Amino acid sequence: MSRKDQQLKTSAVERIFQDKVIPEEFQVPFKKSYNTFLVDGELREWKGKTAPVLSPIYTRDKDGKLGPTVLGTLPVMGEPEAMKALDAANRAFANGTGKWATMKVKDRIACVEKFAKMMAEKRNEVVNFIMWEIGKNLADSRKEFDRTLDYIHDTIEELKELDRNSARMQLHSEVYAQVRRGPLGVVLCLGPYNYPLNETFCLLIPALIMGNTTVFKPAKYGAILITPLLVAFAQAFPPGVVNILFGRGREVATPIMKTGRVEVLALIGNSKSANALQSHHPKKNRLRLVLGLEAKNPAIVLPDCDMDLAVEECVLGSLSYNGQRCTALKMLFVHEDIIEEFNARYVSKVENLKFGLPWEDGVKLTPLPEPGKPQYIKDLVDDAVSKGAEVINPRGGETHGSFVFPAVLYPVSENMDLYHEEQFGPVVPIIPFKEISEPIDSIVESNYGQQVSLFSKNSDTLAPLIDSLVNQVCRVNINSQCQRGPDVYPFVGRKDSAVSTLSVRAALRSFSIRTLVACKKNELNVEILNDILDENKSNFVNTNYIL
């Protein structure tokens, strides 16, 4: 490429933030103080220390200087507020005797339905915040909101099914029993910034609907978008059931864990944070974990693949939301017989991806929310290049402010940091292989075990690979990118990638425990059971079910 061509391309990247007109429908109330939080059913005003929330979208200030947009301020809370929220959650649970824990399933469902209805009314506001806070494009921001509502409704329907299946009395070996699922206690819920609504609510909603009480701290990036929903949480749920704080995890979550008064740690993030929080709990044997952690999902592109399909899915899988997904394809193993063609086609598609601000039509590449991520990506690229890789796409790694154009690196090898680290951003390592044992060995030796994508047209090729990999990862995708959905399917991982399962059905079980009431079959017990059932005296022991 000539220097002139390079300059033209660079200038296009540098113009990403220049004098853009923000459509009125996508504007947010900049520089507002978001000082409301929720404890014990009360919306309270924070009067302490605050911190600015900076958008990855650059705009001009009053002096005409281009820089990150100040969206507003959020509270910086600490141990005193954490203890008040924890106390409220414990009072509401009351060792399993509280109103929420003992409430009929249909009544808890009614509360969640009320919340979902109120949440739906805030769609536009929340969607705008998703774009401004974390740089997700408009289509994906709307999809995240709508998918979250779908998840809530699917969870409700799954709980109804669970309730119907649990409604009957069982008789085995002359013992009557009714088996239902009961809550665990107080749940500390910490969500991720890349899906600050959807993945957070995939923890929060099943925890709540099963009768647990919660302390919830939104992600570091993507916290303001929760504020339009505070009223809905306050009005839909009894006091103390949902408590929402803002601040740094180590200042809020750590003191909560140290008390030992948390039964479940529900976190989507990284293993370092999960391990640190676990270490603070004094009764680790009593702590249940629901964790979605790192992944280094590979694609294996075989010589007999459908090239068009493989390239399309690999671009989508590696660069959707700039590669900031735990399910993203973070390693592309491509057979040496086809690698030249694959690289050429892959680079061509990447170079044609539209970049810009989230609300612009057809935009696929957007600014990155983490301030340090551009430098981190540069360091990964520099390390790989110093050890023999090349950036094979013309604009690869070009940066302007918070925006980084994807860097495609080839050939990547084991001695490079990029081979091992979960890059979580727009940098794509391509690794050539000759023997299928090479990518297989890499997967076996990896610390991660979430998913893999296999690309081949030959069932004889695929079948043994499937059998080799299903015990290494928890989802094998055939001729398609790695992904979470549909939400009814299990979403889990091996090794360092996850603990427990996050899907509609499994999440209800993750946040509950099977509990039964039993008695020997005799005249007295039959009489007692009939009286309880006929007079509907118990919320637990009953044969009613929700249609």
Image (cartoon, grey):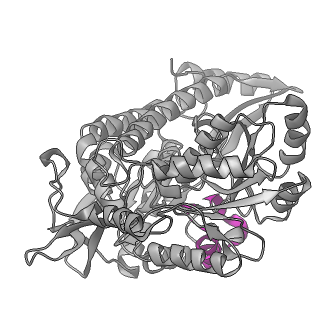
Image position, residue 59 (x, y; %): 19, 67
User: Horizontally, is 39 left or right of 325 in the view?
Assistant: left
Image position, residue 405 (x, y; %): 45, 62
Q: Nearer the viewer, residue 28 or 376?
A: 376
Q: Nearer the viewer, residue 43 or 8?
A: 8
For residue 369, above or below residue 27: below
Residue 143 shown in magenta: no
Please report the residue visible at 59 percent of the width from the left and 56 percent of the height from the top.
Answer: 326
Region in magenta: 267-292
Image position, residue 453 (x, y; %): 72, 44
Please report the residue visible at 56 percent of the width from the left and 52 percent of the height from the top.
Answer: 347
Residue 26 seen anywhere in this rendered image of the structure: yes
Please report the residue visible at 71 percent of the width from the left and 69 percent of the height from the top.
Answer: 419
Residue 276 shown in magenta: yes
For residue 158, above or below residue 1: above
Residue 37 seen anywhere in this rendered image of the structure: no
User: Horizontally, is 502 left or right of 255 in the view?
Assistant: right
